[in-house]
Amino acid sequence: MKYLIAKLGAAAGVFGLVAAGAIGISAAPPPFSLQPFEFVGTAAQCGGTAGTDTVTAKWDNTTGNPSPSILLQKLGATSNCAAAGVDIITPLEGGPVSGITELNFDYKNGEHCGAGAPRFNIQSGSKVAFLGCAGGTQTPTSEPNWTHVEFTPAQIAAALATATILSTDTLDDLYIIFDEGTDTPTGGTIGVAGTVHIDNISVNGASVGSPTSPQSREDCKNGGWTNLTDANGHAFKNQGDCVSYFATKGKNPGNG
């Protein structure tokens, strides 16, 4: 997916990311899948000053509720034109934004939960509605090191209204962005600035807590390919098909 910079003056983060095109959807995809991504803007995208690569977005098998979780990190200034994120690939895309009725995730206690990051971005055309971590309803999870953050239908509707997105407008993309750096104030609910682990990302009550696409060649072996798909929900026909997808960084889609 290609991203363009779009100013979000009301957000705590300096910039948001707007997808230039929607993602294709398979005929029978899973409820949704997750694809961590890293964005470092060019000078043309960032008003003349290119971003620097201080961001990380990846599955982390060492921590989670339970493991794995997704590590999002921005080890530098918030003003740096770069962001870590999670693309949420869902069949809701292409339909009306009213199809989104619930969004939530868990985050690791003591890490960054700010007004602008991590946040859900709901994109319709050039307009983006956002729901920042600190603005969600927060409750402890059964795992004492994690907090659950939920956005209700009323909160989603309010965010859409603020962005002047109508309920009948098309959902072009849904994703999570982390673009607040280590210079962000560390008061309130914010802990370690510039770093957060998130887990159990949920859309309309369906939750994904582990990768659905291969993160290494090893994931494809010993029958592992049968439980995986490419980023668009296409199954693999065999182990080699799965390995090819990983080796080409997604250029060779699943052929199952």
Image (cartoon, rainbow, N blue to C red):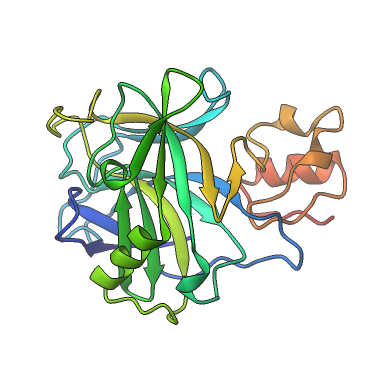
Report the residue at 15% width, 27% height from top. 186
Q: Is residue 250 left or right of residue 113?
A: right
| Coordinates of residue 172 in the picture (x, y in percent) | 47, 71
Camera-nearest residue between 93 and 252 = 93
Q: Nearer the viewer, residue 251 or 209?
A: 209
In the visual, does 176 lie left or right of 44? right
Quarter of the figure with the C terminus: bottom right
Question: Which residue appears at 15% of the width and 34% of the height?
Answer: 184
Q: Is residue 115 above or below residue 48?
A: above
Residue 211 sits in quarter: top right
Point out residue 122 in the picture as x, y percentages from the top left corner: 39, 63
Position of residue 160 relative to residue 244, above or below, is below
Which sits in the foreground, 112 or 23? 112
Q: Quadrant of residue 92?
A: bottom right
116 on left or right of 231? left
x, y percent for residue 47: 16, 61
- Marker count (numbered): 0
- Residue 223 lies, with reference to residue 16, above or below; the image says above
Q: Specify whether residue 212 is in view.
A: yes
Residue at image point 19% right, 54% down: 11
Q: Please state the horizontal and vertical placement of residue 50, each as a whole percent of the image.
A: 21, 50
Does the image show residue 18? Answer: no
> Is 76 displayed left or right of 89 in the figure?
left
The image quadrant of residue 109 is top left
